[in-house]
Image (spheres, helix red, strand yellow):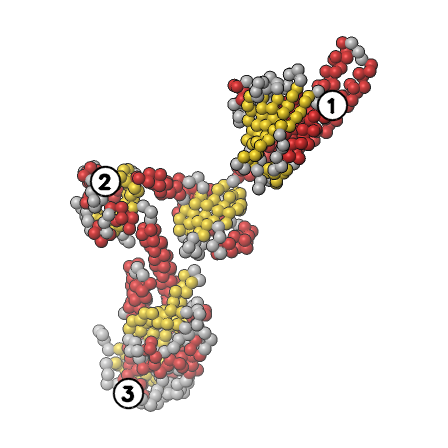
Amino acid sequence: MSRRRHVLCVDAEESGRAADHLVGGDLEVSTARTAADALDLLAAESVDCVVASPPLPDADGVELLERVRATHPHLPFVLHPADGSEALASEAISAGVSDYVPQSDDVDGERDRLIEAIVSAVEAGPNRRAERVVNLVRTIQSALVRARTAEDIDERVCAAIVDTEPYAFAWIGEYDERDGQVTPRASAGFEAGYLETIDVAADGSRVSRGPTGRTIDSRTVETVQDIPVAPEYEPWREAALERSYRSSAAVPLVHDDTLYGVLNVYADRTAAFDAEERALLADLGETIGHAYHRVRMQELYESQYRQLFEEAPVMVALTRDAGEGPIIEDCNRQFAAKLGRSREDLRDRPLTDVYTDEAAQKLLEEDGYERALAGEFVTTERTLRTRSGDRLETLLQATPRRNTDGDIVGTNALYVDLTERKRAREVLDQVEAMEASIDGIGIADGDGEFVYANQAHADIYGYDDADAFVGNTWRMLYDDDELERFDAEVMPALRAGEEWRGEATGLRADGSHFPQDLSLTPLSDGGYICVVRDITDRKQYERQLEGQRDNLEILNQVVRHDIRNDLQVVVGYATILREFVDGEGRDHLERVVSSGRDAIDTTKTAGDVAEVMLSATEETKPIGLRYVLTDRIDEVDSTHTDAILTTEGTLPDVAVPADDMLGSVFKNLLTNAVVHNDGPVREVTVSASVSDGTVTVRVADNGPGIPDHRKDAIFEDGEKGLDSEGTGLGLYLVETLVDRYGGDVRVEDNDPEGAVFVVELPVVD
């Protein structure tokens, strides 16, 4: 010290105990017998610390403290009462006393504690405390940056704290929710077996009323400012006082509602944790909690990466840059097995040892390795040499490898055996697929925070950069109503390990909504993969189709009812006119009747086509083929009495996957065979057979047949439709229905003349 510290002792006794303790030491001592005398002396002289020993004639100790603070707000003030009590200690600490040292029967111990309290209070003034606080924060932040494991964090934090005055001891405890116990896992400072003597819990018992138990419940900093008298500290008081602990604080180490432990700090003086100190410790606890979270996530992803590295179905080698060329630092089992060597044998070998001479030249002399270090390497072929001297053709992709400080130290080299070229292409496609995908792809951790998102994900949601998602929760992408639905329907499925697919309404960066197809796949670590696609255009198209369906329904009603009814009226009146018309007019009238009936048949077929097109589903059911065929043969036979319809053999009694429109298939084929038949006697023969789970129905006629150049085109995509040449509505309907039923239809030549329409349908067991 540059000068002796000046202490003012205020005691009603002429020669008080405080002055007796201090006179003759390294301190300059003044005395006052009343509060008024003390204030006058403070106004006239420079004092470094006040020691008050109430009771006083004109004030108690706390009243004097308040008067001193009114004129000297930062002056250290030690209360040294003749009759100490828990209530007085609590009141004094609340009022901001620097320290509290009650008089006791142990005179020597009392003198030592009083001198220690004065020196500590003087040296821990505002500037000193601020400097100490700043240094502590800097030290711990620096320690956390370098920490790589939770154990590192524990040890570095405890060591940094006990190196800071007035902290004497620090430990971090692990809280077990199952039994409520708190188990020490790291400590530093003067402990002398303290942790072996105490029992700490948060289970409602008497040992859970201390600062540690309270902070587990409250998740806030909890302190005991006066261990010698605080009633809640009774279970640990004796052990604490033996080690000179006078106050303590418990700090929750929390991040995102996860408690990573409790930091306990002990000071060698009372009232060590004022409001500013507690605020500092609370912020420090959050910082430490975040460091635990960072390390936990780092360990998780390192574990996943290591598992992927070890179990990868491709060859992987990690190299380090040795200046003269790459060295194999590590490799996976696949790499070693393909080369016929052990991993131990390959470690620390030059990479060129497993390359052919030509491949080694490309690696070194043609700057292949330098391009890989620079991130400019292009996937290429490399030939490796196995232990037995065989050549191994591979496809190589190499990327820079960085250390924990971000410096490039080597490469990650992925080799795919080109004897499995197809597999190689698949693997390399997967390397690029996530970034190249037109779908938005994101990966969220178990807390719902994105750890990865591709650019398509950002584009879909209207963000400029995919980094906008990393570290943020997926909940930013949906409004409250959708989030409520997700919590009720989607998240339970993911927690159960089930994949979820469906439609949702997303929220863009500009606040607009859009429809999306969403796929969520759970991962083993509690996270999940999100794949999203904007279906705005599809929804608009669906609405357009719905409108077209409505219009088609109206048109179908007009064709099937209005036009058909009018045509039936025309045919009816034309039939009546037969008895009034003869000669040449009779021929014209018959043509009217015939054309009218054809038009009515056309409206019927058009209605069937419309019904198929309007069908919302394509569900089928087992339908008995024999009944449908027989019924349609009888129907066409009764309509066309001038034609001969026969069956060849027995029609098989089997069921096929179809619907109520199956009869339209055979009615149209039979009608087509009769109407387009120009033979002197129109003959149509129907046969059917079953083989290998398929029933084949053949409708043969003796008409003009179909030219070869039309056989291949008659049912092709370019010919199908309402305007297809030569097919008409009937054959368009046949092809559409047979395709729906999972079958096939084609046309062949009949012998000696005519055509055969062949329908193949699967048989239902």
436 and 82: which is toward the camera? 436
Horizontally, residue 721 falls left or right of residue 474, namely: right
Q: In this view, does 572 lie above or below 289?
A: above
Kind of element beneath mark 2: strand
In-front residue for pair 638/209: 638
Q: Which amino acid type is marked by label 2?
A: Arg
Q: Name, please, the residue furthest toward the front.
A: 649
Q: How crowded is mark 3: few (under 14 residues within 10 Å), some or many (20 or more)?
A: few
Residue 320 visible in the shown view: no
Q: State the residue in front, 340 or 360.
A: 340
Residue annotated with mark 3: 108
User: Which three-letter amino acid code belongs to the residue tagged 1?
Assistant: Leu
CA distance for labels 2 and 1: 82 Å
Q: In which quarter of the image is the C terminus?
A: top right
Whole-angstrom CA distance, mark 2 to mark 3, is 88 Å
Q: Which of marks 3 and 1 is in front?
A: 1
Residue, disc 2: 391
Q: Name the residue under label 1.
A: 567
Give the SS element for disc 3. helix
Instruction: Give the spatial CA distance, label 3 vs label 1.
Output: 127 Å
Label pair 2/3, CB-CB below 8 angstroms: no
Q: Where is residue 258 in the image (x, y as percent from the top left)?
A: 42, 63
Residue 755 placed where, x, y %? 58, 21
Three-letter amino acid code at disc 3?
Asp
Number of numbered tags placed on the structure image: 3
Q: Which residue is drawn at 33% across and 47% down?
A: 313
Please provide percent x and percent y for residue 121. Answer: 31, 75
Residue 231: image location, x then y, percent: 42, 81
Residue at position x 57%, y 38% in the image: 763
For marks 3 and 1 on the same chain, the one whose residue lies earlier in the sequence: 3
In the displayed structure, does residue 180 sit left or right of residue 112? right
